[in-house]
Image (cartoon, grey):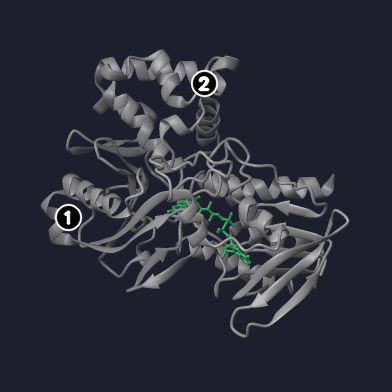
Amino acid sequence: FDAIIIGAGLGGLLSAAHLLQRGKRVVVVERLPHSGGRFTAKNFHGVQVSTGAVHMVPFGSSGVLSHMLRRLNVPHRLYDADVFGSFHVHGRQYRSRGLLGVAQFLGPRQFFWFIRLGYLMFFRQLPPEERRLPFDLWLERHINVERNPQLVAFFASISRFALSLELNQVSTAEVVRTTKNMFRFGAPAIVEGGCGEITHQLEKLVETYNGEIMLSTEVLSIVQEQGSVSGVRIKNKATGEEQSLQASLVVSDIGPRATNGLLQHRRIKQADVLKQKYAEDHTANVTASDDVQEAVGLKVHILSDVSLIPHKGIMYCLDTKRIAGMVQPTNSDPSLAPAGKHLLISHQVIQSNNVEEERGLALADLRSMFGETFDKHCQILTMGTYRGEWPVNRVAQGEDVQPQLDVQGLYLVGDAVKPSGYLMVEGVAQSVNNFLDLLDD
Ligand code: FAD
């Protein structure tokens, strides 16, 4: 082979598709029995229940991922949000067509400060001393946070939903760059057929170009000779058979922690990561150790008889204890759930080690937002946590690592190497663009 890709997640499949189009012989090695990683779904009672993503592409049909898919000729359809969003606050939902619609729930005084913050973020150069400042401290510097609770909650819920981070975990520069990109590219979109449709089409493209995808096969180690990569050692999980694959280019879609483990012939196991991370009293989702800082979350899939969100965008939740936002993807593609039913997905940052408590708080939030309707018309399908080696973001936004490792011919792609300002799968796609640029250098 010319190239070995470790992991058939979105980053791995996009890398494989590009290398195949350049005439390279490529093999993708995936330890699970299916491709797609955290960007695919399984059919559960007629519902597309995703392995990660809420079926959403952050910058929609004008974004980096969609542009890349068009360039690769990957069929896909995205339904861009028809509103900026809605905001659940003061016991009701305020729908906001454009950004200025937030005036409805902020009221004149907080809206004045909203406009002022907008000016400071977008119409003047951010002073160097403010760039690294955590965003909560930046807010404290410019507004009276006690007198502007909904304004603070507005920023907090967007950060929790889009980045899976609290405001004290993200720098002001990163918030500004990410928000600028949201305006530059456009509204988020729901994928027709669900997020798995994109990775499925990419899988088909890889096969069309005679690329090989080895499923249920785990990479055990990355082999290097005199500072250059020379291949990998793999194990077929069904037969237990081990073998070596050779290539002078290895692209890893599994993040720096697991990649470094493979370089040291060490398998990183989810149970060990969680044990190490949560043994101590970490009340936040980022560890104090020198390990990579991932972003963690809890997601609930809900099936409802009645529609709870009247648009294709995100409903941000401002006076909840945990849930930061929700989407109703069936508003864009009804086939994601059985006929007449609505699929809703909520997302929150996990703020403590106590998963049972986090789940309880999610349920309490759903009841407080939707009252009796929730108990009468809604059914919880799944409630899952995303952390360790299966997190929301392998590296927290703004803390991403470099794509090139010390070993020649070994590169990282995926959500550990998102360029600044590019969130989630837009960051994954942009990481692949960066990797291709490095290859061309
Ligand atoms: P992965 O999808 O993790 O792919 C890595 C692959 O490598 C996996 O398939 C894994 O099984 C495989 N692998 C690992 N180790 C080995 C090994 N040793 N050998 C072989 N294979 C191996 N993004 C959005 O844009 N929109 C959203 O709506 C959204 N919502 C999200 C909600 C949640 C709850 C979560 C968890 C994530 C969400 N994301 C969202 C983020 C998005 O899912 C990820 O950014 C993206 O899927 C990451 O893709 P990747 O290719 O970098 O990694």
Could you say which quadrant of the image residue 9 lies in?
bottom right
Q: Is mark 1 within 8 Å of ligand 1?
A: no
Residue 399 drawn at (x, y percent):
58, 37
Residue 327 drawn at (x, y percent):
34, 50
- Secondary structure at badge 1 equals helix
Q: Is residue 30 above or below residue 236?
A: above
Q: Is mark 2 within 8 Å of ligand 1?
A: no
Name, please, the residue furthest toward the bottom.
239
Q: Which residue is mark 2?
A: 122
Q: Is residue 307 above or below residue 187?
A: below
- Picture quarter with ligand 1: bottom right
Q: Which residue is mark 1?
A: 374
Could you say which quadrant of the image residue 307 lies in?
bottom left
- The amino acid type of the residue labelled 2 equals Phe
Label 1 Cα crowd, 10 Å radius (few <14 / some 14-19 / many 20+): many
Residue 12 drawn at (x, y percent):
65, 60
Residue ID at (53%, 16%)? 123
Residue 265 drawn at (x, y percent):
70, 63
